Image (cartoon, rainbow, N blue to C red):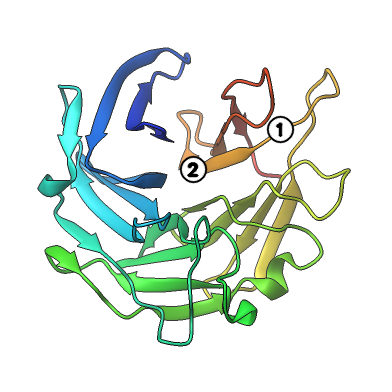
Amino acid sequence: MVLDNSPARVLEYSRAGVNTRTITLANFGDTEDIHWISGNTFVISQEKNGALIDEIVVIDLPTSGTTVDISTATRRLRPTYGSTITGSDNGGIEAVALLSGNFYFTTEKSPATPSGEWSVWKVANTGSGIQTPAATRAFRIGPIISGKAADISGMATDGTYLWLISHELAAANWYGHVFKVTLKGQVVEENTLPTFTSGDFWRQPEGIEIFTDTDGKVKIALSGEIGCTGCGVDFMLLSPP
């Protein structure tokens, strides 16, 4: 399942790269991240942009059909960060992952004020309808990515750790960063994405998922957003070192 935000929709692909179905997300806003939870249930994050607000949406996607309305969502979490933190356009919720009954999430970039409050937060996956839970800080982002990356564009979990991906780099010769961290923000592993045999590199990696493949190996699935003139949306499958 690949998420688009212009327009808001989910594109279903086979492992062979064939687009088998497109599901319109009716009345959604600036959609940013998607992950499977169980059965037909998925979580979709929405980013604050203009009049839109940050949301973590838990919703069942239809097994057939081509549209789903946000009004059918099981819950819509609108986390509050405390009165001292001010969000900004394109600085809202970008990435989310469910682990041990909690949604861990972070913004794309540092909030407008104060800059030192850029963090991974968590809220419980509970309640029904629209909820406004107070978020709890899990750890600060700055110490992890300082001097290496300038954004967080996606998040996933392997059931124990969080995996954070960035595409805005702090060095011109890097090609995207993946950080594996504990729930307290300790870096366990970090990698830069490889270049292609042509010498080109990923322009804008955005989506990340961790899964165990049919060969028993843990792999990372990545999707890319159009990041340059003439660039399409790319997919990459990697085995962590």
* Residue that carries the numbered disc 1 in the rendered image: 202
How far across and how far down the image is residue 63, in percent? 17, 27
Q: Residues within 10 Å of mark 2 (few under 14, many from 20)?
A: many
* Residue that carries the numbered disc 2 in the rendered image: 209
Inspect this view and state whether residue 100 appears.
no
Answer above or below: position of 163 versus 14. Answer: below
Inspect this view and state whether residue 114 appears.
yes
Q: Name the residue nearer the viewer: 140 or 211.
A: 140
Q: Residues within 10 Å of mark 1 (few under 14, many from 20)?
A: many
Left-right relation of 173 to 69? right
Which kind of residue does numbered mark 2 sit on? Glu
Left-right relation of 150 to 18? right
How far across and how far down the image is residue 173, in percent? 88, 43
Look at 83% across and 17% down and name the residue there. Answer: 198
Distance (Cα) linking label 2 and label 1: 17 Å
Q: Quadrant of residue 122?
A: bottom left
Which kind of residue does numbered mark 1 sit on? Trp
- Element assignment for label 2: strand
Left-right relation of 107 to 8? right
Look at 64% across and 57% down and name the residue there. Answer: 151
How far across and how far down the image is residue 179, in percent? 66, 57
Extreme residue toward the front, this view: 50
**Where's the N terminus, which quadrant?**
top left
Q: Quadrant of residue 236?
A: top right
Q: Earlier in the sequence, mark 2 or mark 1?
A: 1
The reply to whether the C-beta atoms of the residues labelled 2 and 1 are less than 8 Å apart is: no
Answer above or below: position of 214 versus 99. Answer: above
Look at 49% across and 77% down and name the residue there. Answer: 138
